[in-house]
Each structure stands twice: as C-alpha cells, then as structure tokens.
Amino acid sequence: MEVTITINGTPVTSDVEPRTLLVHFVRENAGLRGTHWGCDTSNCGTCVLWVDGSPVKSCTMLAAQADGHEVTTVEGLEQGGVLDPIQQGFIECHGLQCGFCTPGMMMTGRWLLDNNPNPSEVEIRDCISGQICRCTGYKNIVASIQWAAEHPLTSEVTA
Amino acid sequence: MTAVEEVPLSAAGNPIGFGSMRRVEDARFVRGQGNYVDDVNLPGMLHSAILRSPHAHARIVSIDASAAEALPGVVAVITGKILEGIPRPSLLGDNFAWMPTLSYDTQAVLATDKVRFQGQEVAYVIAESRYIAKDALELIDVDYEVLEPVMDAKMALDAGAPIIRDDKGQTDNSITDVHGNKTWESGNAESTAAAIAAAKADPNCVVVTQEIMYPRVHPAPMETCGSVSYLDKVTGQLTMYTTTQAPHAHRTVYAMVAGLPEQKIRIISPDIGGGFGNKVPVYPGYVLSVIGTIVTGKPVKWIEDRNENLTSTGFARDYHMTASIAATKEGKILAVDVDVLADHGAFNGVAQPTNYPAGFFNIFSGSYDYPDAHCKVTPVYTNKAPGGVAYACSFRITEAAYVIERVVDCLAQELQMDPAELRLKNLLRPEQFPYTSPTGWEYDSGQYEKTMRVAMEMAGYDELRREQAEKRTRGEYMGIGISFFTEGVGAGPRRDMDILGLGMADGIELRVHPTGKAQLRLSVQSQGQGHETTFAQIVAHELGIPPEDIEVLHGDTDNTPFGLGTYGSRSTPVSGAAASVVARKVRDRARIVAAAALECAPDDLDWELGRWYVKGDRERGKTIAEIALLSHSSLELPEGVEGHLDATAVYNPPSLTYPYGCYICVVDVDPGTGQVKVRRFIAVDDCGTRINPMIVEGQVHGGLADGVGMALMELIAFDTDGNNLGGSFMDYLLPTAVECPDWELGETVTPSPHHPIGAKGVGESATVGSPAAVVNAVIDALSPFGVRHADMPLTPANVWRAIQGNAIRVDMAIE
Ligand code: FES
Ligand code: FES
C-alpha cells in the first residue's frame, strides 16, 4: 500500500506492506537512522519520535497508521544549523554515552519542556520512565533536560 | 598527576591534558548521525534471520526447509547438515557446523545432532528483506525428539543426569578446561581449612557459613548484536561491520574459523550501542552472516531481536557460592573459604584469559587483611545458553566482590557489630601496598580507610544509624548497606594472560602531521566510553597538542594496530598506557629534531607542555607544531635519526591495576508489600588519576544503575522444562529513571604506581561494587525479622517471602 508521511516537514511516500512498522518506515524508507530499535515488546523507548507533536514508540505503530500525519524525529531537532537546547543539554551534561537511547530520550525531553517548561526532577524522571538507558544511570539525562529548561533560547553552538 | 594540578586550556576551551571536557563523539550522536551496525546498508544487501530451538534439550530428527525455500524473496536456507558438508581447512574443527569458543570448547554454529538450550541456532534464512526472512522461519519444519533437560546446576553432576555434551563423548556434565582440570582451586586449602576448624573450636571465635547465589543476568545493551558481512569474490576481501568490543581478536578468530586469509579480513566496529561484555564472544549469528555472504556473493545483514539477545548471547554470573568466614569475636577476620558451583550453560563459551578459567574470581579475599583464603570452583554444563563472563564483571570480580561483601555483613550480624566498624577493623592499611593477597594478587596501591571515611562522611553514617533506630521503634524498615570492593583490571600482562593464545597487550600508533595536528590509532573499541575524547586528552597531556587537534581512530582493523579490545576495564590501564608511551616516544624524537634545529645537544633541552626549550633560556625553543614541520623539512638530522615524528608502541602491562571504592546505600522497605525504595546511594571511587572526571563519573553512574537492577529486579530464570523466563524486557526488568536515585559521588585519588599516568580503569567498578551495597541495605532493613540473607533479585515477592522466613531459590521457577 502507498503511505505518505511528512517527516521533519518533508513528505515521504513509499509503497509498503500493510504490516510495516513506523520505525522501519522511518529508518528504511525515509533513510533516517537516528531513530533506533531496541526491543520486541515496546519497553525500551529507543524508537521514540513524535507523531503530530506527541511522543510515540514507533515500534508500536504501523506506518499505515501514520499515513497523512506529521512525524518529527531526532534529525528534525536542529534548526538552521543551530542545535536545539535539548541537544546542547545532552552535550553539556554528559547525558549520553553509547548514544543509542539518546534520540528517544531527547524527543521525550523536548516534548516535556514544550508542555512543562520548568519540570521538577520527579516529573522529568517520571516522563522518561518508559525508556531505558543502560549507560548513564539517568542522572545526567535528568541534568541534561534541566539544562535545556534553563537555557530555552540557546543559540550558542558548541559542537 | 592528580586532579588539583593546573591544566592550561586550549583555544577551544578544552584542557590540554586532564580535566572534564565535552565529548567529541556527542556532535554526531545528538544529531542522530551515529553509525551503528544496523545503520549500515550496502548495495544489493540481503537480510537474514535465525531459526532457534524452542526446546532446551532435544534430538533433531529432521529438518524440512522446502516450504521456506519456495517462499518468494528467500535466497537461501542453511541448516547444520549443509554446514557439516563444507570441509574447513583450519586448525579448529573439520567442518563449519561447529566453531571454537573463547575457552577452547566447541559450539554449534547450527545444530546438527541435538539442540542444547532454548534459543539455540537451528537454521539460517537469507532473504531479500528482514520481513521475508522472518516469514520463512515459520515455514521451516523441524521434527524434534524432546529430551529431558538439565536445568538445575545442582543436579548436573548427579548420577543418571542426562548427558548434554555427548557430541564430545562426555559421560557426565563436568567441564574440563584446556589444562585438563575439572575444578579450579586457588589459595591455600590446608591452612584455610585449619584456620576455620580452629576457629570453630575456639570459644573466642565464630565461623559463619552462608549459601549465596549470584543469579544469571544479562548485559542487555540497548543495541542488540549484529553484523553486515561482504565477501568480494574477485578480491577475496571479507569486510564485516559488526558489534564487537574486540575487532582485532575477532578478525583472527574469523580467519581461524572460516579458514580465510587474515590479511583479507577487515573488521569494522562502527558505533556500538553499549557492550558490557555482551559483544566480546564470537556468536553463531556473526559466523552465519559470513557464511551467508560466501554462499550468496552479496552483502548479508544479520540483526538480533531482543529475545534472541536475551536468550542466546552471553549471559553473566550464575554462580552458586557457599562462603565460610572465620573471625575472632572482636571482629578480626581470620580466613575465608568459598565453594562455587558454576553454571556455564551448554557450551563453555566463557570469554576470559586462558589461565583463569574462573576469571579473576579468586580475588574474592577482597579489601581485608587476613592470611588464609581458598576457593574451589566446579563448572558444569546445563541446558542453558553459554556465556558467563559479561556484564561489566571484570572477569567475575562482580561475583567475588559480592560474596565477600555479603558474607562480611553476615559476620557483622552474627557478631552484632556495626558493619562499618567491622570493615574498618580489617581493611588493608596504606603501608601494606603493594600487597600480595592470600590468593596471589598483587594490589598496587590504596588508601582504603581514607576512602571509606569519605563515604561515611558524605552519607552522614552515624546520623543514618540514629534515624534507623528511631524509625524501627515506629515499625518503619530502613536499611543501610555498605560495600567495599577491590578490583584487578587491565589484563595482561601477556606472559600470564591470553585469549585463544593471543597475549593481552595492545598496540597503538600516533601520527603527527606536518602542521602539528595528530591522529591516534587505537586497538581498543569504545561502546560508549568516550575514547575519542579521553585518548586525545592523554596525548594532549604528554605533548601539549590541544585535544581538538588530535583525531582518535578506532574500530577498523585495516586502520588500527592489533590489540585485544575493550572489556574488563582494560582500555585505560592498557591502551591508555600505550597512548602515553607512544606520545613520549614522539616527544623524545621531537627533542632530537628540536636540538638539531636549535643547534644544541638533545640533553641541553628541557620540556614544558607543548615545547622543548634550551635549558636556562626559555625564549629559545620550538613548539611541538614547529618541530613537526621541521621533522618533515630538509633540516639535517643526526646520523640514524629518520625524519617525521610518527611512532608506534605496544603496551604489555607489568601487572593489573587495582581500582577500589566504598559504596553506601540507603533503602526503605515496605514490609507489607516487600517493595524496596533506594533512597540514597553514595559512591566513593578511587580509580587513580582521572583523565576526564566527567566521563569517569558517567561510567560510575551507569554501573550503579546496574547494581540497583541486579539487586532488585534483573533475572534470567528457567522453568524445569527449560523455558527461559527472561526473554523480553517485559520479563527481564531493567531499572528506569524512577528506580534510580540521584547518585552521590565522591572520590579519592591514589595513582597506580606502575601505570604511566597513574590511571586505573573505572568502567566496571560500580557494577562490581554496587549490588552488595543494595543487598546489604535491604538485609539490614529486614534484620529485625531475623533475616540474614536472601538472594538477588530482591523483588517485592522475594523480600516478602524473606520476611515470612521463607526465602526461595531465585534461579528456578517455582512449580
Ligand atoms: S523498539 Fe523498544 S520500545 Fe520501540
Ligand atoms: S547512552 Fe547508551 S543506552 Fe543510553
């Protein structure tokens, strides 16, 4: 079947099997490999992206269900060569090690700040609790999101 | 050498040497531009999937793959029978159905005679897409004759137990190592037994014996294992993108397994999404992707599912330990004896130095001063997945640290002594270093009491004890747990330590370009540790070149020198030392070039960061960048001195380094539900010199989360039929941000005396040290109920059972 999904502002049309998962559409058909895949059971959150502005585990959704919708991925965070504060926060606070969970964590973190610009530590931990990081022990992920909350307008690109 | 030294900053604001700096790697990762194996797509690439056994133990009667072969889009179906028919001109086995393990055992690539664990590889499908490959698996018809499995290690050696390795002509389920040993002993059996017997007979002494299980867990990196292999039939070049922590060692193993010429094999380990020891062994899946490209002539990708990762690749631990500790009633430890039943699964695939078949478990005597220690490890085959050394274990020091720290707490409870006081009475003293342990390890340096006091101070230990006493009167159960661990990391030296005969030394190459910018080529492989940043800092420290001007290359065997890879916390102790040594070689060469340019003798020059200058005349000198250009110029150099500054080195460590630390955990236990809340966790690590403190702390944070996970929720259990009960993230629970507290970190710095920059390696310290702190805290909370021990994971159900006086075995499902 033919599916058209607008990804980071660009429509992508592909003929796919009805069972194609959104995560595979984004990675294989759109060629955007920043969204990862890490489990069979929708527990890990490495596949989190936004559908119509809300975080979704893209392994739990069919590409066909996203037909005609707007998807935003990690590749869509940087605007005009300027990193989003959430990206800068992860760099500043060492919020990543292997980087595999990072895109999903950043997408959730950005969404949280869009809806709650000054979250408490508990709110941040709660918000990312559907996602697993095996490297960082979460402390610096929390700090990264806090950094982004404190620097909403960063224009200083350091990496 | 220590953190207090003033380090100049580069134009980019980075320390020219040691200190926290942002990671070079992050620029690509935060943009989603990492390049993991599953991101690799080659033209014409095929996909593949593995059919796995649903049974733990069964004879294969027949395999009918015809329906799968007929499915449109399927390119080939490979079975063990087909592999058996391919002769192999190599040293290790005579056909492709079997491969060697890193412990000189054999493991089936695809099962031919029997399946020996649930999840074992049975057939391999290559197809045009991953979806089609998976569809084809459903169409393969395997007729199994189900056999009784051996699921309980304690019954593996019973007379009449089913024989697992009949392929090797075994008549029981014992494991024999390459030296012919069936048990692995260490320390002094007689003196330890005598000391324990004497203590038993002495009214002024006590002996405490406790069975302590370290259950089977799994490293479960977020990225599963996989590879993309391509054999170019014209050139004979095999290129393999693969999730490996040891690219060079893997290249050599593939050369041996596949009988391919090693000069034609190129292993590329791109970005790795976490390893933790899961990506050290060579798995059948990797080998199958190589066979797939040989068969099809096309690139073949194989990527594991999570279920495959959890059920078939390197698990960790599975040590059934019984420890006896003897001490005086004043709390002076006299002797410790540990007996271990080690469950190695169906193939002995443990990744560890050959001469250490139980890994470094025999460092279990720990951080304390006592003369007599002994352990005996009996390994057995069971119908479970192979592995054992993984999950940031520093070659089984996790098990060692856990058993000693747990049994010391049991002793404290028996003596009704504060566990901190008991530890302080027995810790090794600074003047005892270098200290030779009763099992023969030579600890390099430490200030144990100082580190412990820092931790107690940070925790507010006395205040916590007061709070606990007060809460108990109100029926609230708070626990405080301490662990003090010592690790030995950084294997080799070569003379003692090898894997499959490959000595554990690491090469390195430093190129200094004419403009003074440098490239450092590493043999070790980051899986998130930040090597591209920290190794540049080491060279910066030695040569004064800003870290941003040093490119660190790794993960490509064609472009880096040979070395054994990253596991056992060995990158900093071994390859980090190599970086320092190779930079010093460059510095020495630069001195000769500078002397020629300044028309003086090399001995007339002094070094300051980044430049050689004439003794007594600071103005007359040459920077390393100027010298680099001169080294390429027509400047006349002394007889025998070649141009250029490039250098190589191989670092063969003289000994291990011994990082250590003291951890304190505070928990609150709900006695009604058994729920454990980790309220605080204080971790004071001493890993010697800290190259990049930000990265060191990040490594510790990650390991502490591992500790909370293993202590409270992670478990690969089985039922008696052999079903793996931890095959998904719904069943194998990992800690999230909600279960982890806000880690409180401290440090002491005791440099290693034999490492060029005094660094000790820290990647696994927290995983090694933290489980005991959490468990000790929970048991401390439960002590009013008379609980002395309960095994991990301390899930609400297990805690509740322990409170009821009914602690259970965690490794087997209850009927
Ligand atoms: S891949 Fe794990 S939640 Fe989507
Ligand atoms: S950074 Fe490795 S899983 Fe989060």
Image (cartoon, coloured by chain):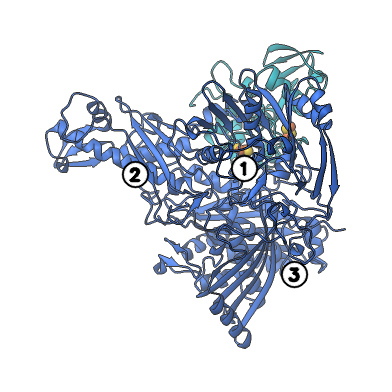
Q: Are marks 2 and 1 on the same chain?
A: yes
Question: In what element is the residue under mark 1?
Answer: loop
Q: Check the residue under mark 3 and report the chain it is in.
A: B
Q: Residue B314 location in percent, x, y?
A: 65, 47
Labels 3 and 1 touching (C-beta < 8 A):
no
**Chain letter for the residue marked with disc 1 in the picture:** B
Label 1: which residue?
B94
Residue furthest right in the image: B815
> Which of B665 and B58 lies nearest the eye of the viewer?
B58
Pointer 2: residues within 10 angstroms few (<14), some, or many (20+)?
A: many
- In space, the residues marked 2 and 1 are separated at their CA atoms by 43 Å
Identified by mark 1, the residue type is Asp
The reply to whether residue A133 is in sight is: no
Residue with the mark numbered 2: B581
From the viewer's side, name the closer residue of B773 and B526. B526
Q: Which residue is mark 3?
A: B787
Upstream in sequence: badge 2 or badge 1: 1
Q: Residue at x 82, y 63 (%)?
A: B801
